[in-house]
Amino acid sequence: MAKIDDVARLAKVSKGTVSNVFSQKRRTSKEVTERVLSVSRQLNYVPNHIARSLVTKKTMAIGLTIPHGNFFFSAFHNQFINGVILEASYYGYRVLLDMIPAQKVRTPFLSSYPIDGAVVMSPTTEDERINLMHMENIPFVTVGRVMNENIDSSPSVDNDNQTIIYNICKYLIDKGHQNMMFLNANELMTVAIDRNEGFIRAMEDHHIQVEEHMIQHKPAILSTEYMDYGYDETIQILGKLNKKVTAIIADDDRTAFSVMNAIKDLDLRVPEDVSIFVICGDLSMMVQSNPSLTSMDLQPSELGAQSVRLLMHKLGVLQGDFPEKIIVESKIVERNSCTELVPPHSI
């Protein structure tokens, strides 16, 4: 395990300077700070939290609050959490993971936690976690847009969700698909609201009428239907209602696999009869699926790392100019689950 002497030697500074970078007891230049932090990352050096707490009068811990249900975290969550933990460790911070049942705050959790700030994942409209931190003056950064009436603005890290769904729709439309079904996130989540706007705008720009069945929303996180989201919707819309759907956009990989099971039970095929596009999925699972699933790479690790950096800026650990809102780039990863429609006259 690396020691402070190793960091000082490789960064070509004194042990006192390394200590100052992490304790913030004395200000150091931006160039020296970045050099020390870079070497610390390289050596996986983490300072002693107890000693730092005594010097700085801080807990040297941040909270990470994630809504959850009765299931294991997805690969997206795991990669995001890894990004948060690794980035926090670079600055000598521990991460206290808080899993909020049913997206409700039943106890004043964060106000009594020994933390200096928090990262809030998957905010909902009028999110109680955000209201509580705002009232308690706890510095926080959200991963997703804040839609709390009493908060004008707050620092956030996010993907450009409106543009993401717009680009997905355009990708499918360019392949000849106009009859789509969008299996969105839960309607209370701000990401779902942004996605809806992007989907509707894409349809309008391409002169496609949005019908009621085209947008569905994931059930509540603790509902019995949550784990099977996508199956019943596909059976209902394509089977019982016999709606023409040639492409389905799935919120995540779990939803996509439910859709694939439903398509199989309807004696249909992917992608010959129905194309599938996954917004948020485990890239390794997307490849192993048959067919491999076209998806969007949202860079979850980078989302986690950027949220910590923005929080460190709010806590005064990182100096300089930081934007209030950081957008992490995303890109389409094309595989085998989306096909071009063959025009009827060419058959």
Image: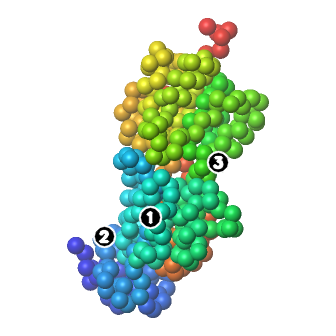
Taking the spot 60% from the left edge, 30% from the top edge, the residue there is 181
* Marks 2 and 1, how far apart at CA: 21 Å
- Mark 2–mark 3 contact, CB under 8 Å? no
Q: Quadrant of the C terminus?
A: top right
Q: Which residue is mark 1?
A: 64
Residue 132 visible, this angle: yes
Q: Earlier in the sequence, mark 3 or mark 1?
A: 1
- Mark 3–mark 1 contact, CB under 8 Å? no
Q: Indicate the secondary structure of the residue bearing disc 3.
A: helix
Identified by mark 2, the residue type is: Asn
Q: Indicate the secondary structure of the residue bearing disc 2.
A: loop
Identified by mark 1, the residue type is: Leu
Give how far across and how far down residue 27 sits, in percent. 48, 89
Q: Which residue is mark 2?
A: 44
Give how far across and how far down residue 260 sits, in percent. 45, 26
Q: Which residue is mark 3?
A: 193
Give how far across and how far down residue 248 sits, in percent. 56, 30
Give how far across and how far down residue 286 sits, in percent. 42, 36
